[in-house]
């Protein structure tokens, strides 16, 4: 049975959480000094990121936006064939993270395909990030763990030779 609904549900949850928290960050953090949440361990620090993860590739925002669309289409097509719930969660997290940051690039200044991504969570010695970034990184870690454990994306359908109990045979 396809796990596409799981993938889309996880993706939708990530996008909603990401966009709501970014709206709150813009409303309450922009132009303000950092706010410690857990001392120096976790702070709210507002940043507009023109690039990819960790502020890299700032001049390639259009290309990053196009890649996000291509990845999203690939994930939706792949998710239609998944039978593993865990891999559906991985795909949903990647899809939601990609779409969350893509929405920023499409809807925020300086304009479509060039918009800056809102980041607001800061850990020591780590670039400022957001919920979409957490979903992307968390999904990548889960994908590695699933791969190490040998969890398949899709289980093969049971063969007719394995399930003979369901077959009704007339007595000879």
Image (cartoon, rainbow, N blue to C red):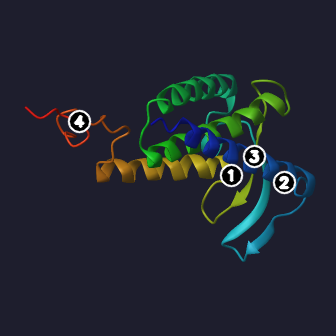
Q: N-terminal of the two: label 2 or label 3?
A: 3
Residue under circle 4? 167
User: CA separation, marks 4 and 2?
Assistant: 60 Å
- Answer with left or right where residue 126 lies relative to residue 158: right
Residue under circle 1? 131
- Answer with left or right where residue 152 lies relative to residue 43: left
Q: Nearer the viewer, residue 65 or 172?
A: 172
Q: Residue furthest left?
A: 172
Q: N-terminal of the two: label 4 or label 2?
A: 2
What element does badge 2 sit on? helix
User: CA separation, marks 3 and 4?
Assistant: 47 Å
User: CA separation, marks 1 and 4?
Assistant: 50 Å
- Mark 4 Cα-neighbour bin, 10 Å: few <14, some 14–19, many ≥20: few
- Mark 3 Cα-neighbour bin, 10 Å: few <14, some 14–19, many ≥20: some
Residue under circle 2? 25
Q: N-terminal of the two: label 1 or label 4?
A: 1
What element does badge 3 sit on? helix
Q: Are marks 4 and 2 in contact (CB under 8 Å)?
A: no
Say which quarter of the image contains residue 60: top right
Q: Quick check: 129 above or below 7? A: below
Instruction: Identify which residue is drawn at 75% across, 46% down.
Output: 16
Whole-percent x, y for residue 117 in the image: 75, 40
Q: N-terminal of the two: label 3 or label 4?
A: 3
| Quadrant of the image containing the N terminus | top left
User: CA separation, marks 2 and 3?
Assistant: 14 Å
Instruction: Identify which residue is drawn at 72% across, 77% down.
Output: 39
Instruction: Identify which residue is drawn at 33% across, 42% down.
Output: 152
Whole-percent x, y for residue 100 in the image: 70, 40
Depth-wise, is mark 4 or mark 2 nearer the camera?
Answer: 4
Q: Quick check: 37 above or below 86? A: below
What element does badge 1 sit on? helix
């Amino acid at each position: 049975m396809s796990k596409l609904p799981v993938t889309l549900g996880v993706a939708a949850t990530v996008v909603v959480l990401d966009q709501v928290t970014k709206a709150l960050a813009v409303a309450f953090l922009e132009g303000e000094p950092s706010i410690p949440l857990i001392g120096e361990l976790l702070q709210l620090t507002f940043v507009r990121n023109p690039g990819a993860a960790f502020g890299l590739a700032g001049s390639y925002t259009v290309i990053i936006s196009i890649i996000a669309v291509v990845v999203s289409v690939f994930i939706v097509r792949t998710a239609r064939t998944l039978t593993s719930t865990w891999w559906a969660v991985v795909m949903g997290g990647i899809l939601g993270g990609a779409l969350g940051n893509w929405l920023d690039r499409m809807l925020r200044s300086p304009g479509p395909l060039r918009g800056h991504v809102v980041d607001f969570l800061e850990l020591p010695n780590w670039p400022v990030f957001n919920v979409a970034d957490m979903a992307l990184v968390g999904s990548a870690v889960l994908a590695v763990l699933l791969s190490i454990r040998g969890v398949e994306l899709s289980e093969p359908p049971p063969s007719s030779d394995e399930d003979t109990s369901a077959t009704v045979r007339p007595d000879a």
